[in-house]
Amino acid sequence: MPPKAAPTSEALDEPTPKKRRRGKLALFLGVPLGAALFGAMGFGAGWFVYSNANSPMSQALRMIDRNTENTAPEGRGGLLDAFRSSPDDQPPQTTYFTFDEPLTTNPLGSRRFVQVAITLSTQQAPVIMDHIRRHQAALRSDMLTALNGFTEDEMTGREGREALAATLRDLVNERLEQLEGAGGIDGVFFPSFVLQ
């Protein structure tokens, strides 16, 4: 009898029916078990993060529950005041919003141009920033109209710019109260102010 030839590497790589069944069984059981394992890990991570009684989410929910009983008339104050006061009596954080494009117009009675970049600040709820983003077009239009009403002399100097900032702040708050029921802008700043 002739000696048997040694099996080639191709023959060794071919799966036997038993190996194929084991591969299918591992795939059939491995996918659901892997998904269950990842789901359990996600649940555990969520439990770990949100089960802490002193987590920021728990503190915010407690402040909302505490202050919904004492809401101000006409929907003003109340909830916004809840965000203004911090639970640890820390000073409130100031949030800034800078408009993407500067405003460019002519001062009243002048042929010169003024180009002003505007930043608004608030120490109230972050929802105020959402209101500003939502109503950017109306706010820019109002501010442009107000800028148009100032003369060159009224815009120059520190006192003139402070008066312009106060006018714009009041104008923005008035528009936000009209559209959203609450103002909340504390300051207006000019990162860039060019008169040419």
Image (cartoon, rainbow, N blue to C red):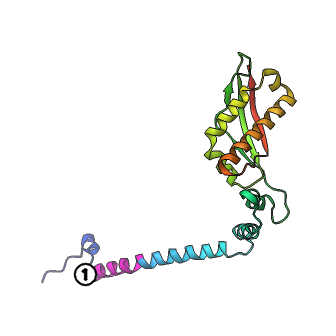
Q: Where 78 sits versus 53, above or below?
A: above
Q: Amino acid at mark 1?
A: Pro
The x and y percentages for residue 84 are: 79, 58
Dot 1: few (<14), some (14–19), or many (≥20) neighbours within 10 Å?
Answer: few
Residue depicted at x 81% and y 60%: 85
Q: Nearer the viewer, residue 20 or 102?
A: 102
Residue depicted at x 74% and y 26%: 149
Prevailing secondary structure class for the magenta stretch in the rendered image:
helix
Q: Which element type, helix, strand or loop, lies under badge 1?
A: helix
Does the magenta-highlighted stretch encompass residue 19?
yes
Q: Where 120 sits versus 83, above or below?
A: above
The x and y percentages for residue 151 are: 78, 22
In this view, the residue farthest toward the right is 159
The x and y percentages for residue 168 are: 75, 37
Q: Nearer the viewer, residue 5 or 37?
A: 37
In this view, the residue farthest toward the left is 1
32 lies left or right of 180: left
The answer to which image quadrant residue 13 occupies is bottom left
Residue depicted at x 75% and y 59%: 73
Magenta-tinted stretch: 18-31
Q: Which residue is mark 1?
A: 17
Q: Nearer the viewer, residue 104 or 100?
A: 104
Q: Where 114 sits versus 72, above or below?
A: above
Q: Where 139 sits versus 25, above or below?
A: above
The x and y percentages for residue 136 are: 63, 41
